[in-house]
Image: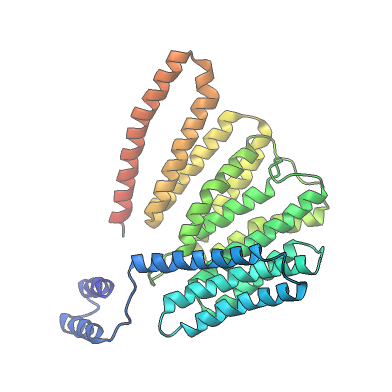
Amino acid sequence: MNQIDDLLTRWTGAGLLDEASAERIRTFEAEREAPPQLRWPMRLAIGFGALLLGAGVLLFVSSHWDALAPSQRFALVLALVALFHAAGAAAADRAPTLSEGLHAIGTISLGAGIFLSGQIFNMAEHWPGGVMLWALGAWLAWLVLRHETQRTLAALLTPAWLASEWIVVLDRAHRYVWDNEPLLPAGLVLLALTYFTRPRTPTPGRDVLVWLGGIALVPTMFFLAITASEPVRMVPVTTALQVVAWGIAIGSPLLLALLWRRAAAWTNAVAAAWVIALLWFSTFREELLLHGWWALGALGLVMWGVFERRTERINLGAAVFAVTVLFFYFSSVMDKLGRSASLIGFGLLFLAGGWALERTRRQLVRVAKERE
């Protein structure tokens, strides 16, 4: 009702509705029989209980695994997947939230079942194919159930499958993921940024991907920064495979942003160009250039948040800018000063710089809220 009141007030103020019509709409919506909504402690209890239930079942299976015959193991794996989904279907009418949690455990059990089945029958296959089947199962579950948890699992498992395929390519080329190979960190950062900048949804609780992208941006940007700190090196594979791999890493997040943001996806294209330029700048071995480019990217994320009235982008951009300044101080300034002078400068940087950054951040957040 609070959301309806806000909309009606806005429409009445704009002259789209008169007061009598707005009051009739309020009365109609207030008299509707709304389904009971669970409070966050109950949702937390259900989620935590589902997690403990799944962990307990997996622990029970692992403790008795060696005592089971291969046929019993396979039957148990199938029973786990079927049991949780059947329990979720049975609870769908009376407890929708509990049903969603049980279906999520069923999809998680599917992944365990896929890899355990490979172990049971000693199948030495292409292991990313198991992740692909797991992601496919999550997508099918989302198409049938339309649960937010299933879409979240699919959004996690699909890039995990693509990343595992590239890890196999690196392994065949006798390379490591962290060996200054730029494709994986670049693709993960752009995908996390696409999730993070997804437009708001009118339905409460449907912005899980935004939270997921914001959480994933921190480790992926750190991964990208470590990779770009030294000149990047491409994997010695065919040109066709390089083109396909980079097309997926750069093009998939952009296509997803175009699907969600339409014309506003040009900012995601600018972010992709920033990542590509960062990888190119790493070949120059200039720390000042890299730190300046990271600071420019952080300011760009802040202005992106102000332009689209998203305070979480302002906060994250300010944090990235602060971390960039700290890394620049430690790597390029502190070693050129004496011990006491470096500590004094570090203290002044924390006091003056932190105060100025926080004041600027609050002003920008206020501007973004006033634009709503």
Position in image of residue 54 (x %, y %): 55, 67
Q: Quadrant of residue 348?
A: top left
Q: Is residue 236 above or below residue 73?
A: above
Q: Nearer the viewer, residue 227 or 115?
A: 115
Q: Residue placed at 32% from the left, 69% from the top?
A: 39
Q: Residue furthest front?
A: 67
Q: Residue placed at 44% from the left, 51% from the top?
A: 304
Q: Is residue 43 above or below residue 302?
A: below
Q: Is residue 359 left or right of residue 86?
A: left
Quarter the C terminus occupies: bottom left
Q: Is residue 283 left or right of residue 59?
A: right
Q: Is residue 44 above or below residue 76?
A: above
Q: Residue placed at 59% from the left, 60% from the top?
A: 254
Position in image of residue 203 (x %, y %): 39, 72
Q: Nearer the viewer, residue 322 or 79?
A: 79
Q: Is residue 277 above or below residue 6?
A: above
Position in image of residue 268 (x %, y %): 54, 56
Q: Nearer the viewer, residue 321 or 123?
A: 123
User: Does the rendering let one see residue 213?
Assistant: yes
Position in image of residue 331 (x %, y %): 55, 26
User: Does the rendering let one see residue 206?
Assistant: no
Q: Residue placed at 68% from the left, 62% from the top?
A: 161
Q: Is residue 371 left or right of residue 134?
A: left
Q: Is residue 193 left or right of residue 312?
A: right
